[in-house]
Amino acid sequence: MKKKKAVVAAALCVVMAGSVLAGCGGGSASTAESGAAAGESGAASSVEASTDDLNVMVETPVESLDPQQATDGTSFEVIADYTDGLMQMDAEGKPINAIAKDYKVSDDGLTYTFTLRDDAKWSNGEPVTAKDFVFGWQRAVDPAVASEYNYMLSDIGQVKNAADIIGGKKDKSELGVKAVDDTTLEVQLNVPVSYFLSLMYFPTFYPVNEEFFNSCKDTFATSPDTVLSNGAFILDDYQPAATAFHLKKNPDYYNADSVKLAGLNYQVIQDSQTALMNYQSGSLDTTLVNGEQVDQVKDDPAFQTIGAGYLWYVTPNVSKVKELANKNIRMALTMAIDREAITTDVLKDGSIPTYTAVPLQFATGPDGSDFSGDQDKFKDVCAYDADKAAEYWKKGLEELGIDKLSLSMVVDSDDAPKKVATVLKEQWEKALPGFEVTLDVKPKKQRVEQLQDGDFELGLTRWGPDYADPMTYLGMWYTDNPNNYGLWSNADYDKIIDECTKGETAQDPEKRWTTLYDAEKIVMDDAVILPLYTQANAEMISPSVTGIEFHPVALNRVYKNAVKAASK
Amino acid sequence: MKKYTIKRLITSLFTLLVIVLILFVLMKLMPGSPFNDEKLSEDMRAALYAKYGLDQPVIVQFFRYVGNLLRGDLGVSYNISKNTPISQLVQTRLPISLGIGFAAVVFGALVGLILGLIAALKHDTFIDTICTIISVIGVSVPSYVFALFLSYEFGFQLGWFPILFNARKAFTSSVLPSISLSMFTMASIARFTRSEMMEVMGSDYMLLAESKGLSGRALIFRHALRNALIPIITVLAPLIVDLMTGSLVVEKIFAIPGVGSLLVNAIQSNDYNVVIAMSFIYSAMYILIMLAVDILYGVIDPRIRLAKKGD
């Protein structure tokens, strides 16, 4: 018996010691495993990070590398790192030739004929042909693919038959895009689209090689082996939802001489403190900085604020809440907001106070000026003036026959919007006697659902531009537009928008531009949108790096012209 | 014992099935859908629902899901990594969380055991006080505070370890997260070991063993520690699952591509399949570990083993 006990005790010791060893072994086994995984994906190439790589931080992982399925900024940015479309953006965001070396527009503005360069190649050696574009575009409208950005071809791009194909009424082969020969692509539009060329750098319009796609099928764009590059870089280390991935320079890129970086080393970091530490220790060349960190880094020459294009605004539910149907109440609300205080004291990230329905710095007109450069044009109806606000408020309450009002505002549970909402509540309750605001904080998905269902009183929301034209914002206030959450409707307004999209004005850029101002004036005069600010991102960009191009539309960051000085 | 194990296994399987059903119902009750995006129109949402079969009645979806599950198919992600099979996502992420969690458990349990033993043997001395202070700090300070502290001191200031997880340097970059995660385990095990050891050492049979002239080491390891281990294993089991399933905050701080952050991101974006799959895997692991613990009891404590035989 005693002996048996001794054996058990000894066995126990062995088990314990074993667990220690297993512990260490577990650690090293996982090392070996991940090492093997990394080795596997990098088998074709060396993935060892080079010192000439640009080390980039992004906040969210890639959701999809399939150009026709991707919908988020990170995915678009990475896809564009290794894929060129017909056009690309220059530093100012204007479309310039990429795979297309020339294009012709018919007199009626309905036919675009692109001539493709003949030296563009996929990374498997196949040439990039017009057929690749036809295949990519047909995928974008194919109901079986259910691309979330298919409206880029139908509503926005107005490509012939796109809407019918998406709706299942026509076959995808009837899409208005045709490969005349290997280097000629002909596109038919329903109506002239003044910004059509600027859509061509949007990843939804990128080419996909059909043969290669068919060889991957379900695994397309999920690993370095299942994507093809025709752009400045080649993806050489990536796994779905990876927190770190790598691209190297594409030596066969038609414009390889101009690409100075050896590669791009992406790191997904969700914690802003970790990101900043990594930047400061030199392992990142760029990083985003949040509002609380701005004070500690704002004097650093590497600190920059970069326009992000998003307009944040409050949308009042004019159709369901009778108090908000009263224009004086809405005027009081918008005049009581101190937008400066929100951007300088709360956000601190370089966001710009905005007093127009179209945000700043994303749409440049035929004369080269910013559509919303003049922020004073609606100062009579949208400015900070607490006295005037109180007057409107009094008048509004009188008209409604009430002396106090409480409303709820639905807001995202993310940090910045929550803070902004708290300040808005304070400002309103201070300036407007008898006003009480309750904040209804919801996860973003749910906030969006509530707005879409019209289940809200006030909503704090944002909108990012899909293309570099004021219409991406003004189109929202059209009667029955799904993003016209408050269900506001104005026949004059609709008429102007129709005129600028389908009418004669659509073909006259100067006239269209001034007519769009008229439309904006209607929404602003009626205070159906309470604009707050144009979002900016605070970033640290290492002084040794130059030439990163930032854009508020489509591709937020373009690295192919970036240069990194030799490390010290 | 065999009969008992089989019985437990069958109950476990049934429990898992019920869990999937509950998860399914919970998903349906969750406000919003995977496809609530400003840019999506009504028609588009309907098309996406149809594409993924979400337009079908819940019960149909449930049985189809279970059917797929039995074939090892966990479905695809709707949002986090569009159309990627979840098995593929889990495959790359679970080993990382398991590795770091396992290292944390082993480190925490060992150090905790040693601290507890020393504290018990030298109780009411200066050393005991120090051990107690360490345990109190370990229990009360959350792991992400340790994580931030460690990454700042040893990663940023001293530069001994990487601040970020790096698959190519998995071992060195796992050190800081593992230690951060192990602190709670270490402290609880230390406290538990100390009190259990004190109790056991005060018991009659220890007095008997001592009076029989057993030497110190045999006394402590063969008699005292073994009896003290049973409650310790009970506390350790859930801690193991906790650590192995990944910690959201520590994963976020060290940018670890683990399963903890995957689940939270999935919940935030209503990525139903990922949420269900991850919760299912967690439940399965929990049930499995609890089963293992029950069986382990028998191995360690003859009283339990004998009682089972009597069943």
Image (cartoon, grey):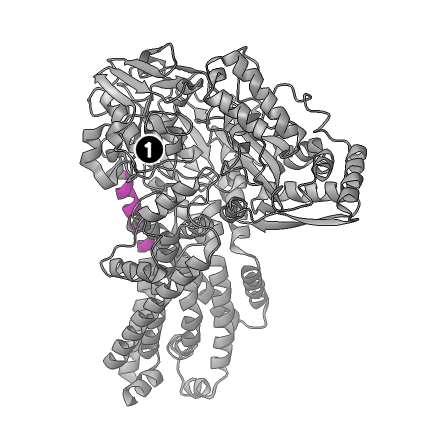
In this rendered view, identify the residue nearer to me: A299 or A16. Answer: A299
Circle 1 residue: A164
From the viewer's perspective, is residue A419 above or below residue B71? above
Q: Determine the residue located farthest toward the front in the rendered image.
A: A491
**Residue A339 found in image quarter:** top right
Q: Could you say where residue A97 lies in the image, as x and y percent from the top left?
A: 36, 14
- Image quadrant occupied by the N terminus of chain A: bottom left
Q: Does residue B207 appear left or right of residue A264 in this picture? A: right
Asked whether residue B86 is in view, the answer is: yes
Mark count = 1
Left or right: where A135 falls relative to A89: left
Q: Secondary structure at mark 1?
A: helix
Is residue A252 or residue B27 the one in the foreground?
A: B27
Decide: is A5 above or below A17. Answer: below
Q: Residue at x 30, y 73 (%)?
A: A10
| Residue A418 falls in image quadrant | top right
Spot the residue most to the bottom: B310
Task: Give, as a single range, the part of the protein colored magenta.
Answer: A26-38
Whether the magenta-drawn stretch holds residue A412 is answered as no
Classify A491 as above or below B275.
above
In percent of width and height, residue A348 lies at 64, 33
Compared to A216, does A97 lie above or below? above
Q: Position of residue A294 (x, y in %)?
A: 62, 33
Overall secondary structure of the magenta stretch? helix
Instruction: Categorize mark 1 by other alpha carbons within 10 Å: few (<14), some (14-19), many (20+).
Output: some
Say whether residue A298 is visible: no
Which one is in front, A222 or A252? A222
Q: Chain of mark 1?
A: A
Of A282 and A311, nearer the camera is A311
Q: Name which residue type carries label 1.
A: Asp
Image position, residue B54 (x, y; %): 35, 52
